[in-house]
Image (tube, grey):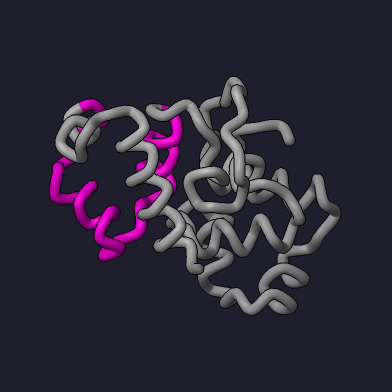
Amino acid sequence: MDNLTNFAENLNDMLIERGINSKNLADALGMGNATISRYLNKERSPSIECLVKIADFFNCSTDYLLGLDDEIKNTDFMPCPPFAERLTFLLNYFKRSASSVYKNENISKARFYVWKNGVGMPNIDNIVKLAQIFDCSVDFVIGRSNS
């Protein structure tokens, strides 16, 4: 399954487990109900910011919501730093050059530098791709966890 399908299914399961509906979640997160409905209907992927808000609400990892982890772990998550800062950290931490990431991993150079220069954020599919490239969790990529 793809990231959007996994996310929609896991979000729906979490709503059922908590006994709340999409409107309750939208109200709690300060979002529109239509946005949550689009997530549930696989019409739209959440931004990184929305993914983190939802994970924080359910006290779970973003990896769990995206179907990359099978269990909910009770962990204290950190606030995410700016992504450009985090990307620089990841390159240093994993001893990778920018070009080795975008050339070998099929990410456009222009898109990579948009992220690196803090002009834009990667979408969910690219965050998952970065987690695969660095062989770590999505929460680590976005700076929400130390592992």
30 part of magenta stretch: yes
In-image side of 53 versus 110 (left or right): left
- Residue 121 spot, x, y in % from top left: 46, 55
* Position above or below: 37 against 86: below
114 part of magenta stretch: no
Residue shown at the point (61%, 29%) measured from the top left = 73
Q: Nearer the viewer, residue 95 or 132?
A: 132
- Residue 62 spot, x, y in % from top left: 52, 42
Q: Nearer the viewer, residue 70 or 94?
A: 70
Residue shown at the point (30%, 63%) measured from the top left = 42
How many dots with numbers?
0
- Residue 145 spot, x, y in % from top left: 64, 32
Residue shown at the point (41%, 44%) measured from the top left = 51
The answer to whether residue 97 is visible is yes
Residue shown at the point (38%, 43%) measured from the top left = 13
* Position above or below: 34 against 146: below
In-image side of 2 versus 68 (left or right): left
User: Which stretch did the figure color magenta?
Assistant: 28-56
In-image side of 68 versus 136 (left or right): left
